[in-house]
Amino acid sequence: MNDIHILVVDDEESMRGFLTLMLKKEGYIVESAQSGEEALQYIENKIYDLVISDIQMGDGINGVELLKRIKSISEDTMVLLITAYATVETALEAFREGAWDYLMKPFDVNEIKIKIRKAIDKRQLEDEVIRLRKEVSDKYKHQNIIGKDNKMQQVYALIEKVAKTDAAVLITGESGTGKDLVARAIHFSSTCKDGPFISINCPAIPESLLESELFGHMKGSFTGAVQNKKGLFEQANEGTMFLDEIGELPLQMQVKLLKVLQDKKFRRVGGMEEITSNFRLICATNRDLLNAIEENRFREDLYYRINVIQIDMPTLRERKGDIPLLVEHFIRKYQGRTEKQINGITREALAIIMDYTWPGNIRQLENIIERAMTLEYEDKITIDSIPEKIKNSAQKFDKIELGDNGLDLKEYLDKETKRYLIYALKMTGGVHTKAAKMLRMPVRSIRYLIEKYDLKDITLEELE
Ligand SMILES: Nc1ncnc2c1ncn2[C@@H]1O[C@H](COP(=O)(O)OP(=O)(O)O)[C@@H](O)[C@H]1O
Ligand SMILES: [Mg+2]
């Protein structure tokens, strides 16, 4: 649980002292101010969970006025008002302005303790429910990493291994290979699985807002900072911070991130308070960071910080054997979303899908299956609902098998030419004119090739 920060505001010293002491004993972090003006200074510089304020305070800002100002600076801060001169009107006004509650002096100490405890618990519970609701869907997502290929087995082994540590992980791989999925899998099998999983897609946030998103900000620190706001690093406390597409992070932010990772401390934009946050860092990129370092677009020192353990995601074309499994998985996933019940895929359609090179990897495969399932008239996905582009491309590369070692094309074509030539001679009883016709070339060329491959003196039997 995060620390709870409370500000006590009262012009009467004995009351201030009493409340402060009592709340500290309850385990809260408590500060106090002796006037509304002083309280505002505190509130501008720090985010409090609760402010307890007297309504009547000398000639300065009164409690209700303070309440209004707090709400305009830091909406989420709860305000509890205390007064000896309660009237129905002030109470109503306080509630209208967003007060959380209202107490009359003299009050029962136990009553106030319980009230505060309940409010804080309720607030934390609400935050927790919102978070859990989100995480249930996140969690559901990660249970379905599909793939039996060796390269995926290695990924699973690494996930298990890093989950036991709090080392920074860098997930690399082309777009759509499952980096997001793996980041969640690590979080939900790690020791911080009960903490939050906070993710941010770096290029999706304009550079000017990135800092305040990550670090939080205080009201008025820049145009548009209309409220005090906690940043993502702070929210990730006791959980996982996932920085997606870290290769796109502007250099200036790289410096700031490095500092956070080194110090584990930072300040909100426009804030004085030092915030500590304890999170596990996972980064992902589809860019070659080493190359980016060479080109001075990525800091080498940051690279070593974020890349304690690297998980490299295989492309889909490197693990084509997993395609049938994935197709089946996506058919099941999208079943029931259309009126028509689609329960499989035809052999021809699967063959085309297996042949394709999938530059967009699993994301692209998923899209194609989803699309096919909405377009298909049969109860299985047929070639009719597969986009032309994929069909054409599959035919274009039909039967080509190029391994990691590549191939000597000239030598290969030479061998194939010889093979076809011998076959044609065999089929035509060695009659050059007929063989030439069969291979659609001039007799002259056939003779040349016979010479070239040393087939001149070969007998028909030998051709067998
Ligand atoms: N191994 C997998 N098994 C099942 N679905 C996957 C797998 N890998 C990726 N996906 C799905 O493909 C889509 C893209 O994955 P994502 O993790 O966002 O890729 P990346 O972050 O690498 O671009 C998501 O809908 C995800 O659920
Ligand atoms: Mg992603």
Image (cartoon, rainbow, N blue to C red):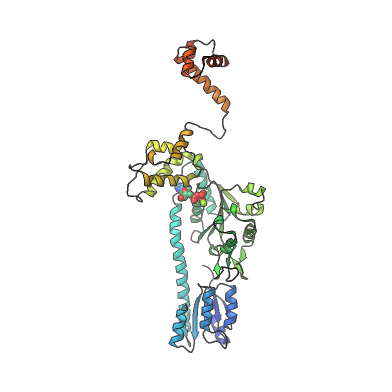
Task: Return the residue nearer the eye: 252 or 191.
Answer: 252
What residue appears at the point 58 percent right and 64 percent down from the top-left corner?
212
The answer to whether 270 is drawn above or below residue 292 in the figure is below
In percent of width and height, residue 76 lies at 50, 72
- Residue 442 visible to an observer of this rendering: yes
Number of numbered discs: 0
In percent of width and height, residue 83 lies at 49, 86
Task: Return the residue nearer the eye: 245 or 266.
Answer: 245
Task: Return the residue found at the far front.
Answer: 442
Based on the displayed image, in which of its 4 quarters is residue 130 positioned? bottom left
Task: Return the residue nearer the eye: 338 or 405.
Answer: 338
The answer to whether 30 is drawn above or below residue 418 in the figure is below
The answer to whether 405 is drawn above or below residue 30 in the figure is above
The answer to whether 363 is drawn above or below residue 38 in the figure is above
Based on the displayed image, in which of its 4 quarters is residue 346 positioned? top left
What residue appears at the point 45 percent right and 56 percent down from the top-left corner?
139
- Residue 22 visible to an observer of this rendering: no
